[in-house]
Amino acid sequence: MEENKNNLKDQIDIALSKTNKNNNSKKLIDKSFSSALSRIATELLAGLIVGAGIGLMMDNWLNTKPLFLIVFFILGGIAGIYNLWRQLNGQGLKLGYFNKEKRN
Amino acid sequence: MKSPVEQFTIKTLVPIEFMGYDISFTNASLFMLLSVIISTCFLYFGIKKTLLVPSRWQSSVEILYEFVSDMVKENVGKGGKTYFPFIFSLFMFILIGNLLGMVPYSYTFTSQIIVTITLALIIFTGVTIIAIVKHKLKFFTYFFPAGVPIGLAPLLIPIEIISYFMRPVSLSVRLFANMLAGHTMMKVFAGLIIMMTSASGILKIGATLPFLAVIGLTGLEFLVAALQAYVFSILTCMYLHDALHLH
């Protein structure tokens, strides 16, 4: 009887550890195709919007009309693609340039 | 026939003017209020009589609580428990708001960019303040971490700053665009049914196709409603994690 109990406990532990592995919620977003698609679109769009916004503000401030708009529009595009690369590379939505070994 | 985007028009219910600003109570405000009331009632009355063997209502409240609690634990990490009430309220507000939008004749307030960008800016400002208070000047190493060649600075710093300011934009645009696109698409397909049935001949039978599409889209929209609430709150958790632990 006692042995049976222990056996059952082991089985429950194994089953629980399995579900915990599958339950990694970070992966859930990545798996869904449509959400990945919308993420790519919003990320690229957000880069351009923010880049153009910063560029326009600096132009208004320094009176250098289209210079900073052009520079930051391009930088915004780069930032969008860079962020997408970071996400697809498994760094998630975390910001910054860092080495992978140090993290986790 | 009504236009597919007419569902998004803001109607003033109670006109209020305050110091020259129009702060009228609109249909969007009504549904935001409803979302708060419904989620509060749902949670409060669900756990009012706690039973050892939970009823269906109580266990659905418990499932939601545990779901968000696990999400915070997993994604914010150490010190995240403090922010659980905020994340949970945010999640419930958006979830109920999205689901309310699925009720016929109702209004989807998350399909307005002003609503989502306000939520996103509150989170963005809050997270930035938390990070600065916690890490002081070390926070700015965020934009240029140690170990990066100095020659990259002129390129990397603007890109990282843009990336940082991209967060509220992408956070709000994602929720807003998903809700707007989904609801418009449903209306377009529903409009096709009416247009095709009022036509003559073979088109009448063809109306079954958009009808089937609408059934499928309704299911998809429920998925999107829940998924986007989840995505919004999980991203908030990730930003909080970055603010608390930097990298």
Image (cartoon, coloured by chain):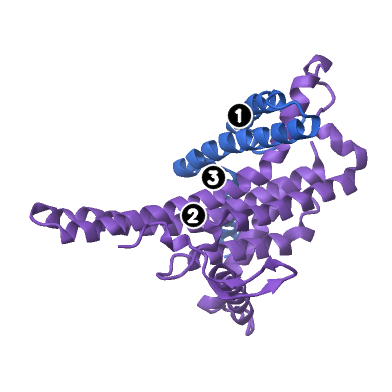
Chain colours: A blue, B purple
Q: Position of residue B13 (x, y in %)?
A: 55, 76
Amino acid type of disc 1? Asn
User: What residue occupies the far top of the structure in this picture?
Assistant: B151
Question: The C terminus of chain A appears in which quarter of the rendering?
Answer: top right
Q: Quadrant of the rendered structure where residue A54 is?
A: top right
Labelled disc at residue A89: 1
Labelled disc at residue B179: 2
Name the secondary structure under disc 2.
helix
Considering depth in this image, is B147 or B155 the residue closer to the camera? Answer: B155
Q: Is residue B165 above or below residue B152?
A: below
Query: Are circles 1 and 2 on residues that touch, CB within 8 Å?
Result: no
Amino acid type of disc 2? Met
Q: Quadrant of the rendered structure where residue B214 is?
A: bottom left
Find the distance from the CA under tag 1 to the CA under tag 2.
28 Å
Side (left or right) of B41 relative to B220: right
Find the distance from the CA under tag 1 to the CA under tag 3.
14 Å
Q: Position of residue A36 (x, y in %)?
A: 50, 40
